[in-house]
Image (spheres, helix red, strand yellow):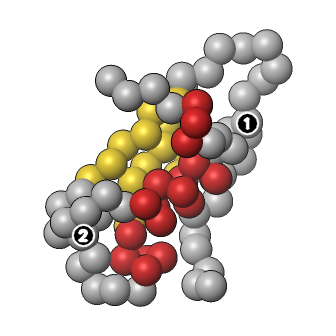
């Protein structure tokens, strides 16, 4: 498994009892990537090619990148609401 520099930003965990806004950004162009923002602050961002080890890996949903940023944001896919 490749080493990934997709760690949570210090202090990025929400305080108990507080509503948290988590935004997941997805780019599925020729360089697919994903990022996560919690309350307007960047928590994690990574390109799919860093995880798949395929140059210019894109043109599809970046599942590996999505899983990596959600893990860094301490979130799961089942809590996401599409807008």
Q: Residue at x 38, y 28 (%)?
A: 82
| Left or right for 64, reference 70 | left
The answer to whether the residues at label 1 and label 2 have Cβ atoms under 8 Å apart is no
Q: Which residue, given by chain and number where applicable, does mark 1 sit on?
A: 13
Mark 1 packing: few (<14 Cα in 10 Å), some, or many (20+)?
some
Helix, strand or loop at mark 1: loop
Q: Which residue, given by chain and number where applicable, does mark 2 sit on?
A: 58
Nearest the eye: 41 or 75: 75
Q: In which quadrant is the C terminus drawn?
A: top left
Q: Residue at x 24, y 79 (%)?
A: 56
Mark 2 packing: few (<14 Cα in 10 Å), some, or many (20+)?
some
Residue 38 falls in image quadrant: top right
Q: Is residue 45 above or below residue 64?
A: above
Q: Is residue 55 visible in this depiction of the protein?
A: yes
Nearest the eye: 22 or 61: 61
Q: Residue at x 43, y 80 (%)?
A: 52
| Left or right for 31, reference 76 | left
The CA span between labels 1 and 2 is 30 Å
Q: Is residue 47 above or below residue 23?
A: below
Location of residue 48 in the rendering, given as x and y in whole percent from the top left corner: 38, 69
Residue 32 falls in image quadrant: bottom left
């Amino acid at each position: 498994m490749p080493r990934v520099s997709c760690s949570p930003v210090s202090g990025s965990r929400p305080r108990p009892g507080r509503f948290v806004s988590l935004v997941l950004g997805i780019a599925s162009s020729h360089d697919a990537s994903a990022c996560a923002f919690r309350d307007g602050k960047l928590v994690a961002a990574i390109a799919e090619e860093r995880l798949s080890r395929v140059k210019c890996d894109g043109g599809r949903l970046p599942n590996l990148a999505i899983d990596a940023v959600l893990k860094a944001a301490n979130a799961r896919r089942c809590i996401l609401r599409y807008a």
